[in-house]
């Protein structure tokens, strides 16, 4: 089965702790994305990566970090610098292409992070 | 700024009646437009997409949307609502030169029996 997996489904963190959210895809997609979703709002882009070993900040990158060492993996670290990290985090991927090429994004099931 | 506006945060219909979810986008030379659906605590699933082909786009589960450039709109419709259609719907735009997507704030569809 091809798809995107995110783990864990639920995550609890104490204030001041860093935590890493996993995202893996076996769709052979070049591009991967991290979004944050808050109640009553659409998704906001945190980081994205168009190719291995390269990534770009999105609209709300402060307090987050990513890596893209492998094509299939794009982990997101929520650092203690993120002031309000409680949210639903969604990972997505799409086929490669230039910036003028738009491809459908496929989404994982999400991770709900709660700061205690 | 590039943006997309979903005109209703909440829509309630009776089962078997038509569904209309409204979306307007800021103008661009060649936007690509999508509708995604999200069931509670789930990821997003693509319903349909417009990429400058036919202006009336048919999607999954009986949904369709019409691209109207003059009105900068991309409203989502379905002739007859089903209970399983109850979910959050997002209108999404991609603009040339910007790889990531711009999301509307979502419309929660409630279907009454």
Image (cartoon, coloured by chain):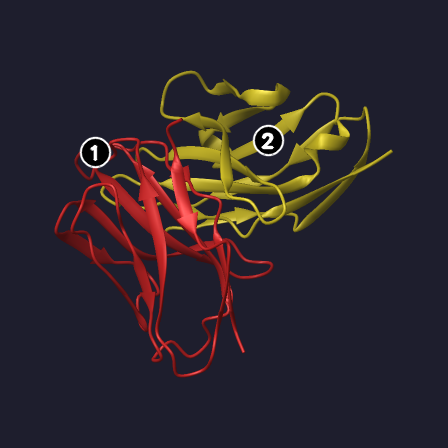
Chain colours: A red, B yellow
Q: Dots 1 and 2: beta carbons under 8 Å?
A: no
| Left or right of B84, for residue B27 | left
Quarter of the picture containing the C terminus of chain B is top right
* Residue at image location 45% in from the left, 48% down from the top: B103
* Residue at image location 39% in from the left, 83% down from the top: A16
Does mark 2 fall on the same chain as mark 1? no
Q: Which quadrant would residue B110 be assigned to in this image?
A: top right
Question: How many neighbours does mark 2 have within 10 angstroms: few (below 14), some (14-19), or many (20 or more)?
Answer: many
Give the total number of marks visible in the rendering.
Answer: 2
Label 2 element class: strand
Q: Position of residue B107 (x, y in %)?
A: 63, 46
Q: Position of residue A19 (x, y in %)?
A: 37, 69
* Residue at image location 33% in from the left, 74% down from the top: A79
Q: Position of residue A104 (x, y in %)?
A: 36, 32
Q: Which mark is residue B101?
A: none
| Left or right of B76, for residue A101 | left
Question: Which residue occupies the foreground of this view, A73 or B76?
Answer: A73
**Most distant residue in the left direction:** A53
Q: Which mark is residue A96?
A: 1
Q: Does residue A9 appear anywhere in the picture?
A: yes
* Residue at image location 18% in from the left, 46% down from the top: A70
Of circles 1 and 2, the one toward us is 1
Q: Which mark is residue B76?
A: 2
State the separation of the CA atoms marked 1 and 2: 28 Å
Dot 2: chain letter = B
């Amino acid at each position: 089965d091809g798809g995107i997996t995110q783990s864990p489904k639920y995550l609890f963190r104490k204030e001041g702790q860093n935590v890493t959210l996993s995202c893996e895809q076996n769709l052979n997609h070049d591009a991967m994305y991290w979004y944050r979703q808050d109640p009553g709002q659409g998704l906001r882009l945190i980081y994205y990566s168009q190719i291995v070993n390269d990534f770009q900040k999105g609209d709300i990158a402060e307090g987050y970090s990513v890596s893209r060492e492998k094509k299939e993996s794009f982990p997101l670290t929520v650092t203690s610098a993120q002031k309000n990290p409680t949210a639903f985090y969604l990972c997505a991927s799409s086929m490669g292409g230039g910036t003028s090429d738009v491809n459908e994004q496929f989404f994982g099931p999400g991770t709900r992070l709660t700061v205690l | 700024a590039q943006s997309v506006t979903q005109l209703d945060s909440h829509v309630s219909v009776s089962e078997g009646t038509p569904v209309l979810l409204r979306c307007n986008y800021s103008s661009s030379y060649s936007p690509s437009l999508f509708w995604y659906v999200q069931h509670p605590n789930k990821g997003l699933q693509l319903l349909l997409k417009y990429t400058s082909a036919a202006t009336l786009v048919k999607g999954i589960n009986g949904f369709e949307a019409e691209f109207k450039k003059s009105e900068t709109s991309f409203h989502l419709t379905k002739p007859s609502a089903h209970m399983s259609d109850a979910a959050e719907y997002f209108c999404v735009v991609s603009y040339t030169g910007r790889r990531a997507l711009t999301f509307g704030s979502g419309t929660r569809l409630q279907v009454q029996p």
